[in-house]
Amino acid sequence: MAPSHDRGSTVIKIGIVEDDAASAALLVDHLRRYEGEHGEAFDVSMFTDGSRVVAGYRPGFDILLLDVQMPELDGFSAAERIRQVDQDVVIMFITNMTQHAIRGYEVDALSYVLKPVSYFAFSQEIKRSIARLRRRSADYVLLTVDGGLVRVATSDIVYLESAKHRTIVHTVDGRYSVVAPLKTMEAELEGKDFFRCNSGYLVNLRHVLAVQQSSAVMVGGHNLLISRPRKKAFLAALTDYLGGRNA
């Protein structure tokens, strides 16, 4: 199970999913060398199969290094399941077959490293992965809840729900009842890829898994109504977001 934490903390959480012990040990060696050369700190967890990492998975890892070929659950299938609950973890595939590269776009994989994994190629891809994390993790919002303030990464907010003079903020880990109307929260989150699907819901576009007829299917299994007057603009905003996420 992934450790829960705020993305953007100093320690970078990395999961290695690799059934071959020698290959896994090489990846750990490369990570330790990178730590020493670049002053990073990695918290590394090991899994021997895709089935092990998806069991009880919750968002928390920053980077996943996924072997493609594994006996029980291959890397692509594991990535597809992980993407159902975690749109943000950076996925890097480890493979000995270059033709796997095309399929990875379906799960927004950042990169591929070919076996046997050379340190130079690996270090370049880890550098790219960390750069993506840092661009993404600088965004937090302070929520005013009963009893004080809560700091939440905007990337962890799935959607916000109007509740009279309060707003229910649904996150990947739970929900908060905020002492502010939805209109105020919408203004605070302007420019951060949130969009109204109807008058009562403000949706984080990064967590939209699909649009089915008049519903937005969200991470966590939520189905939110898209009102008829807003549907065209909502689809346009989602298309623009998906087109620019890898830029």
Image (cartoon, rainbow, N blue to C red):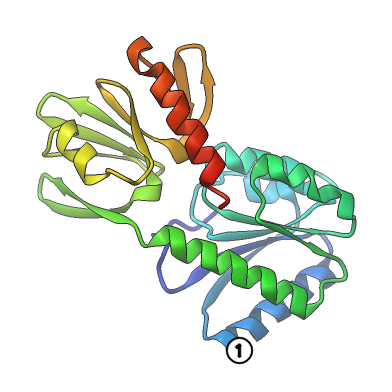
Kindly identify the residue that appears in the image at 51 percent across and 11 percent down: 213
Kindly identify the residue that appears in the image at 35 percent across and 38 percent down: 194
User: The residue tagged with tag 1: helix, strand or loop?
Assistant: helix
Kindly identify the residue that appears in the image at 11 percent across and 44 percent down: 146
Q: Amino acid at mark 1?
A: Glu
Residue located beneath label 1 in the image: 37
In the picture shown, does residue 225 fall above or below 131?
above
Q: Furthest-bottom residue in view?
A: 37
Res. 185 image quadrant: top left
- Residue 200's spot in the image, x, y percent? 25, 22
In the picture shown, does residue 19 fall above or below 222?
below
**39 left or right of 193 in image:** right
- Residue 29's spot in the image, x, y percent? 72, 81
Name the one closer to the observer, 86 or 46.
86
**80 left or right of 71 in image:** left
Query: Quick check: can you spot residue 73?
Result: no
- Residue 148's spot in the image, x, y percent? 11, 53
Kindly identify the residue that appears in the image at 66 percent across and 42 percent down: 107
Name the one closer to the observer, 218 or 127.
127
In the picture shown, does residue 121 fall above or below 205?
below
**162 left or right of 82 in image:** left
